[in-house]
Amino acid sequence: MLKILERRARRIAAGSGAAAVVVLGSPLLAAAAPAQVTAPVQPYATVTSQSGLNERQYPSTDSSVVNILEYQDQVGLRCKVRAQTIAGNDVWYLLRDTQAWISAGYVVRTGTVPYCKDIQVNRLTHTPQATDAMG
């Protein structure tokens, strides 16, 4: 819950800062230009569930809820896997900025999301530890 409140406070602060800059720069533009919210870098997902969406520790409803996203929140996506089917969709996304999963059944995706098996192999095989282990 604290994470959600912090996110809301950051959005409000960002919007207020943008408006303050406009007001100082040109009073006429302040009335015409509302604060703009920018979308995260692609790929990202937008929550479509009116009641919000649980971020989970693993790609399953049996897994612990680590955060709750609100309707129309946008989050960056790192990769996807096929797991438990939710709302007719068996795709789960690993979030870019945190170790949490969301079901694709309650979001709209923007951009192309690679499978986790494809990106995890590259990360592991190109580390100094992996190179040393290979001999």
Image (cartoon, helix red, strand yellow):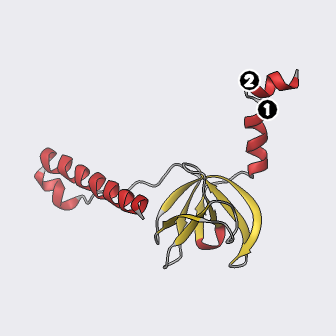
CA–CA distance in space, label 2 to label 1: 8 Å
Given residues 35 and 128, the one toward you in this image is: 128
- Say which amino acid is labelled 1: Thr
Please give the residue where the numbered disc 2 appears in the rendered image: 128
Q: Which mark is residue 18?
A: none
Residue 92: image x %, image y %?
A: 69, 63
Residue 111: image x %, image y %?
A: 61, 55
Side (left or right) of 49 relative to 90 = left
Side (left or right) of 56 relative to 6 = right
Instruction: Write the residue at 29% across / 58% down.
Output: 12
Residue 82: image x %, image y %?
A: 77, 63
Quadrant of the rendering where the N terminus is positioned: bottom left
Instruction: Write the residue at 84% across / 25% down.
Output: 133
Residue 49: image x %, image y %?
A: 53, 76
Side (left or right) of 20 relative to 114 = left
* Other residues around mark 1 within 10 Å, as few (<14) / some (14–19) / many (≥20): few
* Other residues around mark 2 within 10 Å, as few (<14) / some (14–19) / many (≥20): few
In the displayed orientation, state which residue is furthest to the right.
Answer: 135
Instruction: Write the residue at 23% across / 54% down.
Output: 16
Q: Which mark is residue 125?
A: 1
Q: Does dot 2 land on a helix, a strand or a loop?
A: helix
Given residues 7 and 73, the one toward you in this image is: 7
Q: Does dot 1 land on a helix, a strand or a loop?
A: helix
- Say which amino acid is labelled 2: Pro
